[in-house]
Amino acid sequence: MPLNGAVHEAAGGVYRVVLEDGTSVDASLRGRLKQQQRTGMQVVIGDAVTVEQIGDAWAIKDVAERQTELVRRGRGGRAAKLLAANLDSVLAVVSARDPDVSVELVDRLLVVGESSGMRPILIVNKVELPGAAAVAAMLQELYQSVGYRVLLVSANTETGLDELHDLLCSGTSTLMGPSGVGKSSLLNAVDPQLDLKIGALSRKTGTGRHTTVGSRLIALACGGLVADTPGFGDVGLWGVAPEEVAACFPEFQEHLGHCRFRSCAHVHEPDCAVREAVQDGLIAESRYGSFLTARSEAGDVAG
């Protein structure tokens, strides 16, 4: 009899599926799904699936329609790779210091959430470090002003961890950000039973070692799930048309539709309401610069 569940781990063609009764089975792909995987269709963590037992083995019979998809752009013309499905929120994690934060990276992570249909939230870690307060305040002011929720946290001093705990315990989320910002440390602080391995921060390069070796959903003691998969640093705007990028910037919304030309790209056209808003200080120049970069990247991928 077919049973319903969700993929919690994927590695080497084997999928650990947690069933509705809380038990789990290791399943593989067969028939139509296996053929589709060869042609680009992938089964990933977060997928809602139907499994059935065939002899002593389990096989994934069907995959339900996805609500959200998190995709990594292909490099050098290679096909894009689906990383996770059915996530509720993206937590963009950066550190106020060590390594230093890049506003363009923050914008990229937030746009990934917007374009994937997820709720992006900015997490600023390491606010206890010397000189971090000013950076954290700048990020909080910039991104709260355009409607984003911003959490200032510290895995070491436990600042903001109660609020982070509530976020992670509601639904399925993922922590995205560069190595060394303390993603594993934050998860360990929220749920000490996890005891996740932490990549040591390199003083020479300013980056941490990747420690994630397979895709999985981490089950927290509070009931939340956190997607953990390698390659988040390459997450990009695959599948987003250049003309759709502006909609991923919340502060652009009130200006869209007021340009002289209906097909305005908000790049160099005259009488562009978005560009005028930048000139008038209603849209931050850094955010507009990130929009131009994201639009260019979307065009490169689409082409």
Image (cartoon, rainbow, N blue to C red):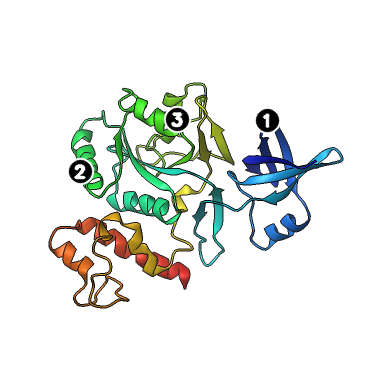
Say what secondary structure mark 1 lies in: loop
Judge by depth and name the residue closer to the eye, 227 or 86.
Answer: 86
The amino acid pointed to by label 2 is Glu
Q: Give the residue at mark 3.
A: 187
Question: Percent position (x, y) of residue 246?
Answer: 33, 63
Measured Cα–Cα span from mark 3 to mark 1? 26 Å
Judge by depth and name the residue closer to the eye, 262 or 248.
Answer: 262
* Residue shown at the point (66%, 39%) measured from the top left: 5
* Residue shown at the point (30%, 65%) measured from the top left: 292
Q: Nearer the viewer, mark 3 or mark 2?
A: 2
Between discs 2 and 1, the one toward the N terminus: 1
The amino acid pointed to by label 3 is Leu
Between discs 3 and 1, the one toward the N terminus: 1
Q: Is residue 239 left or right of residue 18?
A: left
Against 64, residue 126 (above or below) is above
Q: Nearer the viewer, mark 2 or mark 1?
A: 1
The amino acid pointed to by label 1 is Asp
Q: Give the residue at mark 1.
A: 21
Q: Is residue 208 left or right of residue 86?
A: left
Say what secondary structure mark 2 lies in: helix
Q: Give the residue at mark 2.
A: 141
Question: Percent position (x, y) of residue 128?
Answer: 26, 28
User: How many numbered marks does the figure carry?
Assistant: 3
Callout 1 crowding tier (Cα within 10 Å): few <14, some 14–19, many ≥20 = few
